[in-house]
Amino acid sequence: MKKPFLHIVIPLILGIVFCYNINVNTAYLFIAIIFSCFGLALTVIKEKGYSIVLIITLFILGGLLTNLKLNESKLIEFVDKEVEITGIVKKVVSQKDNYSKYVVEAKNQTFNQKSYDIKEKMIVKVKGDKYLNIGDKAVFEGTLRQPNENTNSGLFDYRLYLQTNNIFTSITSSDYKVNVLDSNKLSNMEKLAITFRTKIEKVFDENLTKAHSSLMKSMILGDSSYLDDDTENRYRKLGLSHILAVSGLHIGIISVFLIYLLGFIGLNRRSSIFLTVFLIWMYGFFIGFPTSVLRASIMFGFLMLANIIYRRYDSINIIAMCAVILLLYNPLWLFSVGFQFSFTATLSLFIFTRKINKMFSKNYRNIGKILSPLIAVQIGITPVIIYHFNYFSALSIISNLLVIPILSLALIIAFIIIIFSFFTISIFNYLISIKIAFLSLLLYITDFLTQAMIHLPFNSFTLPSPSLSNMIIYYLIFLIGFRVLNIDSFSYKIKRVTFIYLCVFTFISGILLFEINQKTTVEFIDVGQGDCSLITSGNKRLLIDGGGTPFSDFDVGESIVLPYLHKKGINTLDGIFISHFHKDHCEGIISLLDEINIKNVFIGYENTENQLYMDIKKACDDNNIPITVLKNGDKIIVNKNVNFKVLSSIDYIKNKNDDNNLTMVMMANIYDKKILFTGDIEKKAETIIINNNEKVDIDLLKVAHHGSNTSSNKDFIDFFEPEYAVIQVGYNFFGHPSSETLKRFSDRGIQVYRNDTQGLIRVVIDNKSIVISPFLPVRESITEFLLQNSLHIITFLLFLWIGIELLHSAELNISKMKGRLHEL
């Protein structure tokens, strides 16, 4: 079988994806894998149907491994319980004033005076001024929690990120509940790794500026936390983020340097290669073996082995083999951004480089050798970058062409400096000074280039996250365009199926696009303890409030609302409505005013004594955004299907600092369906609205003040008689939503949706119906998954089928050629 690992990795990946998104009982998967293995054995004996049964077996194996990984935590059984954890600090994540965060390997857990031996990593947060060091053995008391999962579609999933690192739980302890038992409880190898990292940090901190030291530590230790946000964003927007993590590029540079250095000091080639492979694996261990380094180390090892024993090296097959090894060890690595970047970049490098190089004429072939790998990598990683970060760097090829050679040389010099730093002889100190000066010069040049390019117009574009179908079609276009897939060699069967698919895809896409344009969507975005609603109707985009965090410096606008808008490809808002000037409703808007095009801001009142109002007004003035004050009875026409009417109580409220009751209440009329947005009004404002408006039945009520018992009184609920209610609420200390308020709704048969338990709430309205869909739970039933992803599944199966047919055809051709050669 040609490229056997490619045949293995594809069904394995499909099984992982399927069972991560679907709730499938592990017992069923065990039974299925037993029957599949039995069937596989039979097909091998009978020599028929082997490939199909193997694919099914690998698919089930991927699902089984995923389920086992998701359920391997022993601590997860004690979530939301008060426990006592004894463990050893393995990593210091952060240490700030009165707060610190660590990765701890738990060794023992005590619950209800029963002790359990375990070995599992977890996150430990310590409140107070007690700070721990790596290797400290300590006891932590607190409530065990699961890390927060993503509750808005498409955004960063912190829980999944930790799961890819084998972390499933966290605990928060006050400093007086942390008891340090011992220190330096590490293995000799762990101590060696810490010594290595400490040495590198010391060398660069003592000899370089803070910014340059952070950059070099990030590049060599593969930890972007050394960098400030501005530097990281600058490199990312220029398409240089791969430089900041240890990748195949780093391993390649280091390997070539080591082989040359070892050869220079007299070792023969075979010994140099073996020692280089050993040193590369040691380096990977010292920096914690990120997936990109594991992939590069495995590939480099096999490449060097092939070089020594003079065997041909099938790059695509080895890449697939690396993926199989890593996914068998941890199937959740498939969802790691680093894993996806590493493999798409490497695959593209091997698939497209030669094809691109051939496009350059003979006179420019040397330039082609430089540009073709850069272009090839960009082709591969562009969809992944857009999917995760929602930007496309127009200068990525230029920036890579200018910066990579400089930083590659800087990397080599940095390693020479590290080697020299272990010697105390004066000549080495002199050489270090020369190398440091040269390294600083290179880094200043890099700073100059990146700063200059980032300020160029159109250096990057914000784009929506592509769907799986779009990504597959994108890769197909390039594969066909560069004749990696030669259409002329396609059989009639492949051409016919592809044509039918394209017709069906175009037809279904047209229907979906038409339906989307005929519907209005209201999304109650989960911003924690705050309000934020996005309304999409045709080409109109409106935002009601923007969330915020009154009790921390977490920027909801920058971290949740803006990324969510970018995920949906929204760069312009036709209007933002601010209900009132409390942080949990409008602090997040400030970040939006500077980042996207906003045509109008609508408010219900002005308050020059409110600092939040003044900050928003200044940001609007700086960006030439008009502010309109709406009064009771004002009507905003969005389009023929959507309009808003203001139901303000401001004229009746004497206390102009009573922001809750000054809330601008709005009645949205969407296809004759009515939604009432109530902000934070309390009983006083509710009574005023009842007394000054005609009774009307509404379809959905945005529950006031996060479900507080001071709002949503019986008279107010009975006056509007909603069929559904949405409570925008998060973790809080106020007891929101009140059990009393929830009872008022349940007593009237009103179905309640909540952000804190169901994540983002999406309401889709047309002239016939109103459909409400919560984002959580993420893991769906098989039926829901198949219905929601049918178009993507069909596209992927077509792509997979074409690939299998082409591989099968290639194998038949090779067999025929071998037969002819044998005859000759």
Image (tube, rainbow, N blue to C red):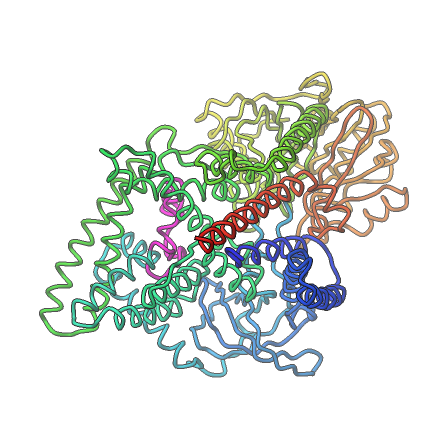
Percent x, y of residue 375: 37, 39
Percent x, y of residue 470: 57, 36
Say if residue 197 shows up in the picture.
no
Residue 682, image quadrant: top right
Q: Nearer the viewer, residue 717 or 412?
A: 412
Q: Nearer the viewer, residue 612 or 425?
A: 425
Q: Split into 4 quadrants, where in the image is the N terminus? A: bottom right
Left or right for 437, reference 761: left
Left or right for 51, reference 669: left
| Residue 641 is a magenta residue | no
Percent x, y of residue 377: 40, 44
Residue 177, image quadrant: bottom right
Percent x, y of residue 184: 41, 80
Main SS category, magenta section: helix
Residue 310, image quadrant: bottom left
Q: Is residue 668 above or below residue 90?
A: above
Find the magenta span and give its range: 220-249
Q: Is residue 501 above or below residue 200?
A: above
